[in-house]
Image: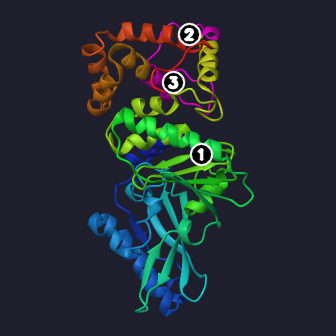
């Protein structure tokens, strides 16, 4: 997913909001039954745990389910619970004799007292043997019914009307093995969900509404905490862009340029929004020539398409230069050491032996080189 959007959301709100959730009483609480009141209290206490003691938050969830996939789903970063939104329950509706759906609104009030909706979410509350309730995820309880296919360490979940390509699944496993070998990653099961379109991705994750969820036909996200990939059917069974994010757990503090660059630094036909690597750099090169751009900034790269941010391109160039100078070991060092913008500049100056101007000049040359059809990445 477009990391720049998430960063923009974070900084847009940072100046206005604290990091704590404000729990706003429901306008309909007086109408709740005893069971609904139990669930309402459960949800409010869970939200309070984010403000008081995050270590206790999983106690509110079923033991045999993930601990709140909405907190790690990949679109909001930081999560919904860490951006200081207000939350108000808008509905607690019965599903069957043992479960309810909790719909709640995450929002903030603007300077002009206007209400700004950031998300409407669905979470399940399930009755336990002692008549208490625990929380459970919409994806695993009330989402679509999936067919399941296991290809070694990848468990695929896909709709019944999707034509599943087993050869692509084998390719994904081979790619994942290469990735683990290169970066010494642990062997973990990946749950790989394929949906019809982007709106279905959000809906099944538990969003009734999120910004832009209906804007694109295709989207994909990686939940690094739970090793879950969410993607759409046009990306298919081998979406390398998201599989590469498996390294995020090992390098959780790596600079976004490195992680964004790695996500597109491969020779698959689809590296970003159904474009291949050469397509992206040919478009960027044409844009630079057309606009007679003579100087570029690593942190503010030119963009040729509103849906494709410069971070991916700038990061891929940085990855290529690092590999060219020191191979995979220098790249691992960069992923471990580079956390801030200052770290990026220091690494370029000290490890790559380039001044800022020299690196920017080199980047312009790299764009032309990487737009060549003969160019091949140096990792996969």
Pick the quarter of the image with the N terminus. top right
Q: Is residue 143 left or right of residue 105?
A: right
Q: Residue at x 59, y 7 (%)?
A: 292
Residue 351 location (% of width, % of height):
26, 16
Viewer-nearest residue: 221 or 24: 221
Residue 201 drawn at (x, y percent): 61, 55
Q: Is residue 80 left or right of residue 45?
A: right
Q: Image height check: is 14 above or below 42? A: above
Q: Residues within 10 Å of mark 3 (few under 14, many from 20)?
A: many
| Most common secondary structure along the magenta stretch | loop
| Residue under label 2 | 368
Q: Residue at x 60, y 85 (%)?
A: 96
Q: Is residue 361 above or below residue 276?
A: above
Is residue 300 visible in the rendered structure shown here?
A: no
The answer to whether residue 156 is left or right of residue 68 is: right
Label 2 secondary element: helix
Q: Nearer the viewer, mark 3 or mark 1?
A: 1
**Range of residues picked out in magenta:** 289-317
Q: Nearer the viewer, residue 234 or 290?
A: 234
Residue 23's spot in the image, x, y percent? 41, 70
Q: CA distance from mark 1 to mark 2?
A: 33 Å
Q: For the residues marked 3 and 1, what is the alpha-carbon distance in whole angstroms?
A: 27 Å
Label 3 sits on residue: 313
Q: Earlier in the sequence, mark 3 or mark 2?
A: 3
For label 1, count other residues whose C-alpha is less than 10 Å away and answer few (under 14), some (14-19) or many (20+).
many
Q: Is residue 169 magenta?
A: no
Q: Secondary structure at mark 1?
A: helix
* Disc 1 target residue: 169
Per the image, is 295 magenta? Answer: yes
Q: Position of residue 66 (x, y in %)?
A: 43, 66
């Amino acid at each position: 997913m477009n990391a720049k959007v998430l960063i923009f959301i974070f900084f847009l709100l940072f100046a206005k909001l604290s990091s704590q959730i404000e729990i706003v009483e429901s306008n309909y609480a007086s109408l709740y039954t005893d069971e609904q009141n139990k669930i309402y209290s459960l949800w409010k206490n869970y939200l309070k745990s984010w403000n008081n003691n995050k270590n206790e938050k999983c106690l509110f969830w079923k033991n045999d389910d993930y601990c709140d996939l909405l907190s790690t789903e990949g679109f909001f970063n930081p999560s919904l619970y860490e951006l200081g939104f207000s939350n108000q329950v808008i509905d607690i509706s019965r599903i069957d004799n043992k479960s309810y759906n909790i719909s709640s609104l995450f929002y903030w009030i603007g300077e002009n007292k206007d209400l700004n909706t950031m998300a409407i979410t669905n979470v399940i509350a399930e009755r336990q043997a002692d008549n208490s309730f625990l929380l459970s995820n919409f994806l695993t309880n009330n989402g679509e019914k999936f067919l399941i296919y296991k290809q070694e360490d990848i468990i695929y979940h896909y709709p019944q009307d999707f034509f599943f390509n087993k050869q692509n699944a084998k390719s994904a496993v081979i790619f994942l093995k290469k990735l683990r070998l290169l970066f010494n990653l642990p062997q973990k099961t990946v749950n790989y969900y394929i949906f019809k379109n982007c709106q279905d991705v959000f809906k099944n994750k538990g969003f009734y509404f999120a910004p832009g969820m209906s804007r694109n036909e295709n989207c994909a996200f990686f939940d690094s905490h739970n090793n879950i990939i969410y993607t759409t059917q046009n990306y298919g069974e081998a979406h390398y862009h998201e599989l590469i994010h498996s390294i995020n757990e090992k390098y959780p503090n790596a600079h976004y340029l490195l992680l964004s660059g790695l996500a597109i630094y491969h020779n698959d036909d689809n590296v970003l929004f159904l474009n291949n690597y050469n397509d992206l750099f040919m478009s960027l090169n044409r844009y630079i020539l057309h606009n007679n751009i003579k100087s570029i900034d690593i942190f503010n790269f030119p963009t040729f398409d509103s849906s494709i941010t410069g971070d991916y391109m700038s990061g891929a160039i940085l990855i290529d230069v690092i590999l060219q100078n020191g191979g995979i070991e220098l790249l691992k060092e960069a992923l471990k050491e580079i956390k801030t913008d200052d770290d990026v500049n220091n690494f370029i100056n000290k490890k790559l032996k380039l001044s800022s101007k020299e690196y920017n000049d080199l980047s312009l040359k790299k764009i032309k080189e990487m737009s060549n059809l003969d160019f091949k990445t140096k990792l996969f």
